[in-house]
Image (cartoon, helix red, strand yellow):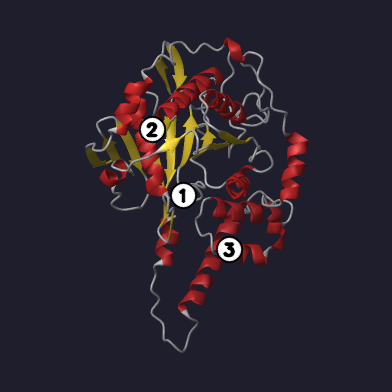
Amino acid sequence: MSFFSNLRKMNFRVPDEKMLNIKNFKKVVYLAVLLVMFVYTFRGSTIYSSIVYLSSNLENFSIIPDEVDIVKNVYPVFNENNYSFDETYIAEVVEEIKEEIEEPVTIDMVSYGTIDSIDKYSARDYINNLKELSVNISQGPGYENVVIGGNVCIRDYSDLPNIPYSDIIARTITLTKKNDNVYVYDTHASESYSNSELFSFDYTSAYRTTDSNYNMISVASKFITFLSEKNIEVVQDNFGHDYGSYTMSYSSSRKAIMTNIEKYGKFGVSIDMHRDAIADLSFAPKAVIGGEEVAQCMIVLGVGYDGARNDFYDENMALAIKLMALGEKVYPGLFRPMTVRNSTYNQDLNDMSLLIEVGATGNTLEEAYRAVRCLSNLFDIMYLD
């Protein structure tokens, strides 16, 4: 991504009247780069799938969003069936492979221990008075390591300089159950967990399943149930955005967010629920909370890149830091370090947006359920009655 950022800032020294203007010259360079990337992507696949794969990824990860229009115009196939903004295609995919969402019959057998045994009002006082915390920054291997208040950890892989952490921490966040509904969706809905005694299923691909009883749609649905029990209004998008094409999942979920914002207005909080994509069943980050093993959560925050920043990154970060600080107070060990990257992850659409990874491939579904039970209690603390 830094290559494209630097390319945007290049100053070409050319005569004013003898060559193309700088803007057109840069487009030529962009097309050349796209061609090289296309040739690389083409290996072992058809021209058709290569175009779609390359173009969708450029757009999904916000590398050069303006210039992707060039690809769409040169290759009209991009806007046909394999382009996820085609709503007819989306509907057909759903009908073909999406399972009906049903509550797993074993859910009542999950033990939540003493997860709910918390002093809600004492915790609320703590978060409301959270105005000043120490900020310590050091250099890690390829990232900036930020420690806030001694226990909130951030790994900043982005190229955004001088993030004003102290100012962000000082922001007041007011969320009410009456006015600030929660939007929950799953860009990578098929992400799933390890089989367990309570939950046994078949993978439909590498550590993924399109059976919505056992993937992120199930975890999000359980989270929504817990929030609803606390009288927090929730809008759920239970569409499998990666069921038809994994590479175009962010484009698909972006379309859904925009549609729902148009329908409901901006949300109090927008949450994209994932599972860590590390393909290793031995990786199972967890903490013991309330006497039970709970999948650890990780917040991923996208600040955008130079020239196309996420205008809401600071508001997203304020919410994330306060949620993590509250988590360390109420459920120590629930959160892994936050990851900050140059992507946007659609967090530029709503001013309070979170991407939360609940556990990893090695965790079990019941550990993920316990994690979202903890998260629902944290939001209940943050939301005013």
Q: Is residue 332 visible?
A: no
The location of residue 178, given as percent across then percent down, is 50, 35
**Marks 1 and 3, how far apart at CA:** 22 Å
> Where is residue 259 shown, x and y percent of the image?
62, 49
Which residue is pictured at 55% across the width and 58% down the height?
A: 37
Mark 2: which secondary structure? helix
- Mark 1 or 3: the one toward you: 1
- Would you name the residue on which mark 1 appears? 343
Task: Residue 93 in the image: state x and y as whole percent.
Answer: 74, 41
Observer-nearest residue: 79 or 372? 372
- Label 1: state its secondary structure: loop
| Kind of residue at badge 2 | Leu
Badge 3 crowding class, 10 Å Cα cut-off, few under 14, some 14 to 19, many 20 or more, is: few
Q: Nearer the viewer, residue 68 or 47?
A: 68
Q: Earlier in the sequence, mark 1 or mark 3?
A: 3
In x, y percent, where is residue 273? Answer: 53, 34
Compared to 365, does 9 lie above or below? below
Q: Do callouts 2 and 3 mark residues in contact (Cβ within 8 Å)?
A: no
**Which of the two discs, 2 and 1, labels the residue nearer the N terminus?**
2
Q: Residue at x 41, y 56 (%)?
A: 2
Residue 35's disc number: 3
Give the mark nearer the N terminus: 2 vs 3: 3
The quadrant the N terminus occupies is: bottom left
Query: Which quadrant is home to the C terminus?
Result: top left
Q: Which residue is mark 2?
A: 323
Please give left or right for residue 125 compared with residue 202 in the image.
left
Given the current orientation, which residue lies at the most extreme bottom position? 17
Q: Secondary structure at mark 3?
A: helix
**Residue displayed at 66% across by 43% down:** 245
Q: Amino acid at mark 1?
A: Ser
* Distance of label 2 from label 3 (alpha carbons): 44 Å
Q: Nearer the viewer, mark 2 or mark 3?
A: 2
